Amino acid sequence: MIAEADTSRFAPLFLETGIPLAVMGMIVVFLALIVLITIISAFPFAMGVLEKVFPESNHHAAKPKQAPKPTPAATDDGTIPGHILAIIAAAVAEAEPGPVRIVRTRQLTTSELAWTLEGRIRHHASHRLQTRNR
């Protein structure tokens, strides 16, 4: 009686919808993965064959043209070139309401650049969460 109950209870596992179906599904998945591995592994060989059939044209193999070196923003005597001054003047005229006159330009020192660092520190510190006493 017990043996019949056990076999009848596990019978659906060995029919069409049980273990054979699961094994068949795993076999299909592994075969699909093997096909993908084979295709990906064949790419270098296929590229070598294609390179022999269709060699690289000259415009692809040519060396790139040398780009001209950019001119430095500041000249040797420390002055700013005229075209940079024109850009600065246009930016100031756009930002300020009314007529403006640029009297002097100079490089910022490290101490003058420190205010940006201080602003970043304050901004990040304002986002810190307060710890709760537990």
Image (cartoon, rainbow, N blue to C red):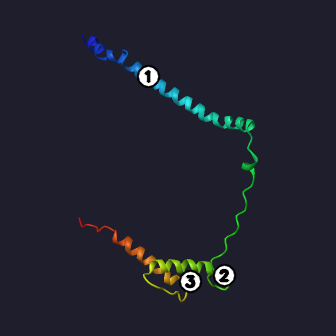
Instruction: Quadrant for residue 121, please give it.
Output: bottom left
Q: Nearer the viewer, mark 1 or mark 3?
A: 3
User: Residue under circle 1?
Assistant: 23
User: Residue under circle 3?
Assistant: 107
Asked if residue 8 lies left or right of residue 110, the reply is left
Q: Secondary structure at mark 2?
A: loop
Amino acid type shown at disc 1: Val
Q: Do the residues under discs 1 and 3 have CB atoms within 8 angstroms?
A: no
Residue depicted at 44% across the width and 84% down the height? 98
Residue depicted at 38% across the width and 15% down the height? 16
Tell me the crowding category of disc 2: few under 14, some 14 to 19, or many 20 or more residues within 10 angstroms, Cα based. few
Residue depicted at 40% across the width and 20% down the height? 21
* Residue in the foreground of this view, choosing between 41 and 59: 59
Is residue 85 positioned above or below 43 on the image?
below
Residue depicted at 29% across the width and 13% down the height? 8
Asked if residue 89 lies left or right of residue 19, the reply is right
Amino acid type shown at disc 3: Gln
User: Residue under circle 2?
Assistant: 75
* Residue in the foreground of this view, choosing between 133 and 65: 65
Asked if residue 46 lies left or right of residue 107, the reply is right
Is residue 134 positioned above or below 111 on the image?
above
Q: Secondary structure at mark 1?
A: helix
Report x, y in % for residue 5.
26, 13
